[in-house]
Amino acid sequence: LRVLGQVQATYVAAEGPDGMYLIDQHAAHERVVFERVRAGMSSSAPEVQSLLEPATVELDAEQAELLVTHRELFSRLGFDVEPFGGRAYLLRGVPGLLAGRDPARALTDVLDTMAEGGGFDSWEERAAYSVACHTAIRAGKSLSHQEMTELTRQLEECEQPNTCPHGRPTMIHLSSGQLEREFGRR
C-alpha cells in the first residue's frame, strides 16, 4: 500500500492494487502491538525497561489477586514486580512498549483491562491485548507521513491484518469499481 495521507487525524488513506484503503490507525496499531507482544511472550527474554528508581504500587484486592495468580505471565510480559508488604508491590521494570509511561499506572491499567476479560479465551491473549490497548496510537493523533508508512508496513506484515484483537476492522477497502460507480464512470 502507498500512503496518501491522514483523514481526521484518525484514518490513514492509502492506495493499493485495486483501489483505496482507509486504515483505522488505533485498530491497526493495536493489531501490530498485540502480535508483537504475543511473540515476545513466547520468547525466552521479554523486552523489559528497567526503572532507575523502583515504583511502589498499592493494588486493590482484585488487582493483587490477579497479579499473584498470574505472576509468571506478568514476568513474560516484561513486568518486574516483587511483593513489598500487604497489597503493596515494588515495580522494578515494565514491558519495553510501556517505557515512558507512568509505570505504576501502566501496571494497574493492564491489570484492570485483564480483569475485564474482553472476550478473550486465554489469559495470555488478555495480557497481550491489555498491553496493546494501552500502547496503541489513539484516534485524533496526527501522524507524520513516515509514521503512517511505518504503521501500514507493520500492519501488512501481521498474521491477521484485517481486524484488531477484538475483531473490529482495521481497514476498509474501496475497490476501483466502487470508486468508478460512485463517480458515475460506470
Image (cartoon, rainbow, N blue to C red):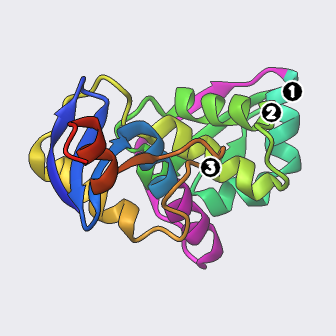
Mark 1 / mark 3, whichever is N-terminal: 1
Name the element at disc 2. Answer: helix
Furthest toward the bottom, the residue is: 44
Q: Residue at x 25, y 68 (%)?
A: 17
Q: From the viewer's perspective, tell me whether residue 115 is left or right of residue 77.
A: right
Q: From the viewer's perspective, tell me whether residue 147 is left or right of residue 100.
A: left
Q: Nearer the viewer, mark 3 or mark 2?
A: 3
Task: Confirm whether the magenta stretch covers residue 38.
Answer: yes
Q: Nearer the viewer, mark 1 or mark 3?
A: 3
Check if mark 1's residue and mark 2's residue have beta carbons within 8 Å: yes
Q: Nearer the viewer, residue 43 or 118?
A: 118
Determine which quarter of the picture holds residue 135. Answer: top left
Mark 1 / mark 2, whichever is N-terminal: 1
State the residue position of label 2: 115
Q: CA distance from mark 3 to mark 2?
A: 16 Å
Determine which quarter of the picture holds residue 144. Answer: top left
Q: CA distance from mark 1 to mark 3?
A: 24 Å
Bounds of the magenta span?
34-60
What amino acid is found at the position of numbered circle 1 in the picture? Glu
Mark 3 / mark 2, whichever is N-terminal: 2
Neighbourhood count class around disc 3 (C-alpha, 10 Å): few under 14, some 14–19, many 20 upward: many
Q: From the viewer's perspective, tell me whether residue 104 is left or right of residue 28.
A: right
Q: Kindly identify which numbered label has been placed on residue 62.
A: 1
What amino acid is found at the position of numbered circle 2 in the picture? Ala
Name the element at disc 1. Answer: helix
Task: Confirm whether the magenta stretch covers residue 91.
Answer: no
Q: From the viewer's perspective, tell me whether residue 92 is left or right of residue 142.
A: right
Q: Kindly identify which numbered label has been placed on residue 165.
A: 3
Question: What percent of the width, then of the height, locates residue 81?
Answer: 65, 47
Neighbourhood count class around disc 1 (C-alpha, 10 Å): few under 14, some 14–19, many 20 upward: few
